[in-house]
Image (cartoon, rainbow, N blue to C red):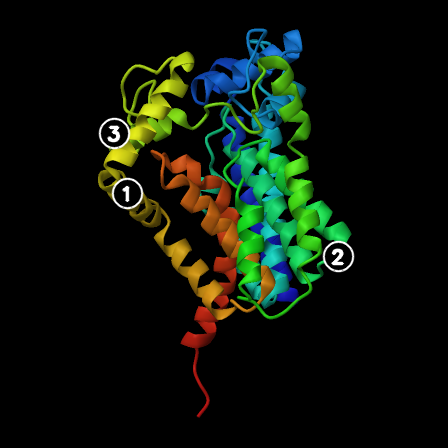
Amino acid sequence: MRAALSAFLVLLGVGMGLRVSAGLTTDTLAKLRDSGRADYLAFSRSLKETGVLGWSGHASAFRGPVYPLFLASVESFDAGRRPASPLIEAGLCSLEMPLAGWLAWGLAGPWAGVAAAALTSLHPALSRPLPAARVEPLYGFLLLLSAAGAAAWARKPTMPRAAAAGLCIGLGLLCRSVLVLFPLILAAVLALGVTRPFDWKRSVWVLIGAAYLSLLPWTVRNWSQFGRFIPLEDHAADRNLIAAVDGVIENLEGPSPDGGPEIPFDELGTRRQEALARIVRDPLPYLASTLERLGVMASWHGPLLLLAGLGFLRRRDDPVVVVLALMAGTFVLMHAPLSLEKRYLEPILPVLAVLAGCGVLDWLKSAGPRSS
């Protein structure tokens, strides 16, 4: 136990050092803007300077409110000052390491926790994230927080824990909407009886309700501003869907995922309908490209996925493991229909690291000497 705790603390120090070092490389506002997503910076600046979430005082729901609100609350947007958000995000991302380790420790013991902390601390996509105005580092922390809340509920499914888990998931949806179907998928899978029995049937509706009711203020704001039902981001994934229907697997360099000129926002709805109509007329090419994207995602993180799969298979009767695996699976499958970038998968890697930490331990036990 003492050795495991010592290793755990060393990994936390190393991981935090790597993250802070990455954050220090962004020392000007221009670097923050140019190496990330300019729209997030524009939304946050508009929010800070005009009180309006959108483009230079013009309201928009293209991006969810959480990340622009975070940037607006910590950045001064003074060109002569070092940006604050990279170092603050480095601190938040550092919390993923003890959280992932704690989750794995509770599932499979201290050395599983050490393995999960090591994977979270040292994985290149997590330890050296691009320090820029992009949502993945903060969103990854919110996803792991949601995983911890859902795991606590699965371990002891009380109404307060269900509400807390749902609120965490809802906060994540207001950052990025990738897991919008996860609460429903969770309830459906549990109804199939895939885990050992536990009393989830009443409290799961509290979890679902808390997750989706969290979207109500955002939905009301959008109805008031635009006269439309917009519970999540408005058209945020449309360019990726259109590119995917055109056969794009990984986004190309340029303003648009297909490398061409960016589709104007006002045309996205029409172009999306045209893309969906093409899928209906001839679905096979799109299905083939979707399967290819699944293969590409697996190739990016093959060892981590293999260990996570091993951890799941060895402990699949544990409700906590099922919840974590469903979250990771939902996240990956929601990206498969859209054109990809490697950074899109970064937020789910800490959750996979928890499962993989259990997988590392099980692999070591199975590979060790056996008594006759």
Q: Mark 3 is on which residue type?
A: Asp
Q: Regarding mark 3 in the picture, which secondary structure is present there?
A: loop
What x and y, as percent, mark residue 233? 52, 26
**Considering only vertical position in the picture, is 125 above or below 360?**
above
Q: What's the distance in space between the residues labelled 1 and 3, CA to CA? A: 12 Å
**Considering only vertical position in the picture, is 173 above or below 114?**
above
Q: In the rendered view, does 41 fall on the left or right side of 293?
A: right
**Which dot, 2 or 1, sits closer to the camera?**
1
**Marked residue nearer the N-terminal end (2 or 1):** 2
Q: Regarding mark 2 in the picture, which secondary structure is present there?
A: loop
Q: Mark 1 is on which residue type?
A: Leu
Give me the disc on residue 158.
2
Q: What's the distance in space between the residues labelled 2 and 3, CA to CA? A: 47 Å
The residue drawn where x is 55% and y is 20% is 61
Q: Nearer the viewer, residue 72 or 172?
A: 172
Q: Mark 2 is on which residue type?
A: Thr
Q: Which residue is mark 3?
A: 246
The answer to whether the residues at label 2 and label 1 have Cβ atoms under 8 Å apart is no
Q: Is residue 34 visible?
A: yes
The residue drawn where x is 43% and y is 61% is 309
Q: Is residue 120 visible?
A: no
Mark 1 Cα-neighbour bin, 10 Å: few <14, some 14–19, many ≥20: some
Give me the disc on residue 154.
none
Q: Quadrant of the C terminus?
A: bottom left
